[in-house]
Image (tube, rainbow, N blue to C red):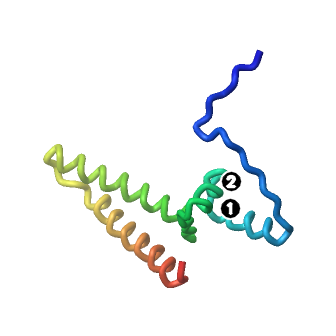
């Protein structure tokens, strides 16, 4: 005997689209990196979905910077001098991140 699954969102909605509408939906969905469900709910509730070009690269840069800042913080907490190369990496990473963000703004996205 199947036990019914309790879902937070128990209601299901199906819609029909022509080829052009479906192509638009699919391209926006792929660009957003969201699930179809999340994308649809955001669209219906008026929450804007912002697509940032180079988002994978931005995330990589942020992770790298976070790791380097953690190393600097750890060194300061242990009352030692952070290694110069780590500080240089943070500076270089900040410049690269700024360039990526500037490109997003210049591209109008």
Asked whether 104 or 60 is in front, the reply is 104
SS label for mark 1: helix
**Crowding near the residue tagged with mark 1, few <14, some 14–19, many ≥20 C-alpha atoms within 10 Å:** some
What quarter of the picture does the C terminus occupy?
bottom right
SS label for mark 2: helix
Note whether residue 54 is visible.
no
**Crowding near the residue tagged with mark 2, few <14, some 14–19, many ≥20 C-alpha atoms within 10 Å:** some
Direction from residue 108 to residue 18 in the image, left or right: right
The label shown at residue 68 is none
Picture coordinates of residue 65, whole percent (x, y) = 37, 59
Q: In the rendered picture of this protein, how many numbered marks are placed on residues?
A: 2
Asked whether 58 or 74 is in front, the reply is 58
Residue sitting at the far left: 79
* Residue at 45% in and 79% down: 102
* Residue at 77% in and 15% down: 1
Note whether residue 26 is visible.
yes
* Residue at 72% in and 67% down: 27
Q: Which residue is mark 2?
A: 36
* Residue at 34% in and 55% down: 68
- Callout 2–callout 1 Cβ contact below 8 Å: yes
Q: Which residue is mark 1?
A: 29
């Amino acid at each position: 005997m199947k036990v019914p699954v309790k879902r937070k969102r128990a209601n299901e909605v199906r819609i029909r689209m022509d080829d052009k509408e479906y192509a638009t939906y699919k391209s926006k969905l792929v660009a957003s990196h969201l699930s179809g469900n999340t994308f649809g709910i955001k669209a219906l509730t008026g929450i804007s979905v912002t697509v940032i070009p180079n988002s994978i690269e931005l995330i990589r840069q942020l992770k790298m910077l976070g790791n380097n800042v953690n190393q600097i913080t750890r060194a300061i907490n242990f009352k030692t001098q952070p290694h110069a190369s780590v500080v240089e990496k943070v500076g270089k990473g900040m410049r690269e991140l700024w360039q990526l963000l500037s490109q997003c703004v210049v591209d109008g996205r």
